[in-house]
Image (cartoon, rainbow, N blue to C red):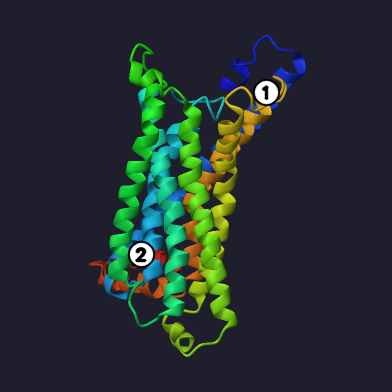
């Protein structure tokens, strides 16, 4: 495994620590691929299909969760390619070159930015909906256009980071790239744009939402236009997203401040540092199946939407009762 290969020739305790961490990480990666990957693939696809097939009944939160589900599907595509490599498991299936590594990294960064900013904008738009329910500032129409800008901004931000990664892998003879060979700069950019800005915005939105809940206003009586369960879903989704993504961004912060080799004072601590980085990325991948499961359980309208979708299918009870009963189990 790559962690242990980096420490060949060191003392026995470090080598044993490497082997233990490698075994634990291999087990965690395989568990995710066997459980989390199929769950994320199925439930994210189900969330997207059910909502897009019921566009008329979609609300502002539904649009953001569809957006996060699409980002979750991208994470599902990236996860097997990384988790089946020697970086995560000792029973690796393949290795990939720098070009594939950069492609996977860009897809991961785009998905992470879309997830974090969709969560942030959901909280801000929910505040607008509570404060000014009749203005339609947080309408489905506006939300769809905002989500388009989120994807565009995520792509542009990721490609600006891409310059640092690309220049880190090509010849130093190019003067322009030789000045940009700094992976820490790319991590610092992702840390600031992908975590610090959304975290500040979410905290600000929560302060405003709590203030509205404490101060009863005539407009607040109209705020029940959204399903009451949306408030619980909002709080749960924002908290879970930040819990799952914070470790990954904290490792970026450590890498930015301490550098690739300065993150530990001795070689004895480096296996632990690399192990934590891999586990934090596994937690980030897990958001791809945790969020759709949470949406499925906490959104009271999802079951009715799924039933309407099943009723429109060409399959009828008398022609394929087995498939219909199977889908009914999903609804319940």
Which residue is pictured at 41% across the width and 21% down the height?
179
To which quarter of the image does residue 109 belong? top left
Q: Can you give x and y, in whole percent of width and height, for residue 258 in the image?
A: 61, 29
Residue holding disc 1: 18
Judged left or right of residue 12, residue 41 is left
Q: Closer to the camera, 118 or 37? A: 118
Please tell me how crowded label 1 is: few (under 14), some (14-19), or many (20+) other residues with Cα within 10 Å: many
6 is higher (above) or lower (below) than 55: above
Count of labels shown? 2
To which quarter of the image does residue 1 belong? top right
164 is higher (above) or lower (below) than 140: above
Residue 35 showing in the rendered view: no
Q: Can you give x and y, in whole percent of width and height, for residue 198 in the image?
A: 49, 54
Q: Can you give x and y, in whole percent of width and height, for residue 81 in the image?
A: 42, 33
Q: Distance between the residues labelled 1 and 2?
A: 44 Å
Q: Which of marks 1 and 2 is in front?
A: 2
Identify the secondary structure beneath mark 2. helix
Which residue is pictured at 70% across the width and 12% down the height?
10
Residue holding disc 2: 63
Judged left or right of residue 173, residue 217 is right
């Amino acid at each position: 495994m790559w962690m242990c290969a980096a420490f060949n020739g060191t003392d026995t305790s470090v080598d044993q620590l490497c082997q233990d961490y490698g075994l634990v990480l291999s087990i965690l990666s395989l568990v995710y691929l066997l459980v989390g990957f199929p769950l994320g693939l199925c439930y994210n696809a189900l969330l997207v299909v059910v909502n897009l097939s019921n566009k008329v009944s979609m609300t502002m939160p539904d649009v953001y969760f569809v957006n996060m589900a699409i980002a979750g599907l991208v994470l599902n595509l990236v996860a097997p390619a990384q988790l089946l490599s020697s970086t995560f498991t000792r029973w690796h299936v393949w290795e990939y070159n720098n070009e594939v590594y950069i492609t996977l990294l860009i897809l991961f960064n785009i998905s992470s930015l879309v997830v974090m900013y969709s969560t942030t904008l959901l909280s801000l738009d929910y505040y607008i909906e509570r404060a000014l329910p009749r203005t339609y500032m947080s309408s489905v129409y506006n939300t769809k256009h905002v989500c388009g800008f989120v994807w565009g901004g995520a792509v542009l931000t990721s490609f600006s980071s891409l310059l640092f990664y690309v220049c880190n892998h090509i010849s130093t003879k190019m003067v322009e790239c030789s000045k940009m060979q700094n992976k820490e700069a790319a991590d610092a950019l992702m840390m600031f744009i992908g975590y610090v800005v959304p975290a500040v915005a979410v905290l600000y939105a929560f302060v405003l939402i709590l203030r509205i809940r404490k101060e009863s206003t005539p407009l607040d009586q109209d705020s029940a236009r959204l399903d009451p369960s949306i408030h619980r879903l909002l709080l749960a989704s924002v908290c879970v997203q930040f819990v799952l993504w914070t470790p990954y961004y904290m490792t970026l912060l450590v890498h930015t401040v301490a550098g690739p080799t300065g993150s530990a004072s001795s070689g004895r601590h480096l296996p632990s540092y690399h192990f934590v980085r891999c586990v934090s990325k596994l937690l980030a991948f897990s958001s791809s199946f945790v969020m759709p499961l949470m949406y499925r359980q906490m959104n009271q309208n999802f079951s009715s939407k799924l039933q309407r979708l099943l009723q429109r299918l060409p399959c009828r009870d008398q022609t394929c009762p087995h498939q219909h009963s199977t889908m009914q189990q999903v609804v319940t």
